[in-house]
Image (cartoon, rainbow, N blue to C red):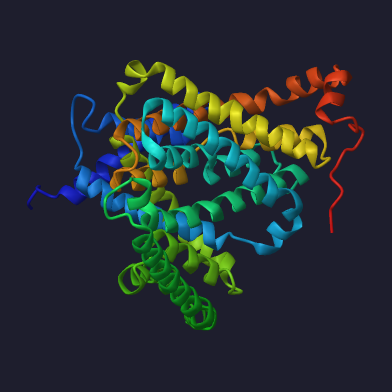
Amino acid sequence: MPHDAPLITMLALAFVIAFAFGMIAQQFRLSPLVGYLLAGIAVGPHTPGFVADTVLAQQLAEIGVILLMFGVGLHFSPSDLMRVRWIAIPGAVVQIAVATLLGFIVAQIFGWGIGGGLVFGLALSVASTVVLLRSLESRNEVDTDQGRIAVGWLLVEDILMIVALLLLPAFADMLGDRPNSSGESVAYTLLMTAVKVALFAALALVVGKRAIPWLLQHVANTGSRELFTLAVLACALGIAFGAAMLFDVSFALGAFFAGVIMNESELSHDAAQRSLPFQDAFAVLFFVSVGMLFQPSIIFDEPLGVLAVVLIIVFGKSLAAFLIVLAFRHPLTTALTVSASLAQIGEFSFILAGLGVSFGLLPPDGRDLILAGALLSISLNPLLFRALEPLEAWLRARPDLLRRLGAEKLGMEKDDEKP
């Protein structure tokens, strides 16, 4: 039997090393995502020892992106978002604007230009869905008021990042100040992008909402568990591939729409359960491949840059979220929980950084700073949650400070639902 099997080698190595590093991270009470990123660094080209196949890693990572976005769409609940729309929508928009501005300023100091600053700031503004949900689940807060606000907030962030991923290619030449970036060419590209996306969305939502639920129900009636799992994966990957080939829409957007469409089916819960193991497995490969791109020397070459990124993620956007929640007259506990939930970055940041580098807007150093910020912020996130109760007690002992922050009414135990 031939042993020159790069795909099998890549898969076996990635899963084994990711498992080992994930277990180590878990033992230190860190998110397993930290372990997966470290596993990628260990087998990447920037560290000594074995170097995995980076080309294969990127293709497997693309599958990971597809399944991650499919999961986002599958769990997208307009009704949940509508319940907290009064705070989630304006809060997410303002918080993204603040974090993007802070990141943009840092990028200008490094001389990365307008496009690089915009991509860099956006990448620092969006939190990881995986990290947030796991943090809330560990505290049994997913179904609480603060949990629903945090999840709704992140849903808005995800939607805005999908829009950014959609528009970035159209504006890449203009943001990069390239010769062919005339207003007419940008307008034409933007118009064609909008037309293609509109056609795809119309076809997906009109035809897909009828065809996919019918297909899932028909397959479920066969009683074959394997066929149902295969149907779910075929829909996710098939729609993503068709969107890219026929409408020139990104795999990520196609997969998101596939999830949204499947969410309309009465079998959406079963579909989520069937696809979850594949989402988890390929998400691991995605994080490993991202770690392979990381240049660890950036921590020593640009310590002030790394510090600035961590401060923006952990304190800058968290403080913005904290003040926004208080401004909407929600309790102190809710403000602290939401701010801690958002004090990290993850998968969307990596996708944005990769796209920015591929279009020549963001230098590799910018991507390395984003990866360093992700590693450190995800590592620090559990510590932030453990500090919430002492911090809340400290703030409650200082009513004058709370009054200046606009948090006088601390007697409320729960948020009142807004109509």
- Whether residue 414 is visible to the viewer of this picture, yes or no, is yes
Among the 4 quarters of the image, the one containing residue 375? top left
Residue 341 at x, y percent in the picture: 63, 37
Position of the C terminus by quadrant: bottom right
Q: Is residue 237 above or below residue 386?
A: below
| Front residue of 243 and 75 | 243
Residue sitting at x 33%, y 33%:
39
Q: Residue at x 67, y 36 (%)?
A: 321
Q: Is residue 31 visible?
A: no
Tell me the residue at 47%/20% (across/down). Answer: 307
Coordinates of residue 226 in the picture (x, y in percent) = 41, 70
Residue 212 horizontal side relative to residue 241, left or right: right
The answer to which of 74 and 416 lies nearer the viewer is 416
Please tell me how many numbered marks the rendered image carries: 0
The part of the image, by quadrant, that contains residue 340 is: top right
Q: Nearer the viewer, residue 237 or 194?
A: 194
Placement of 209 over or under 30, stated as above or below: below
Identity of the residue drawn at 54% across and 62% down: 74
Is 65 displayed left or right of 392 in the figure?
left
x, y percent for residue 363: 31, 35
Q: Position of residue 18 (x, y in %)?
A: 35, 37
Task: In the displayed orientation, state which residue is furthest to the left.
Answer: 2
Q: Is residue 293 left or right of residue 331?
A: left
Q: Can you say whether 232 is above or below 177 in the image?
A: below
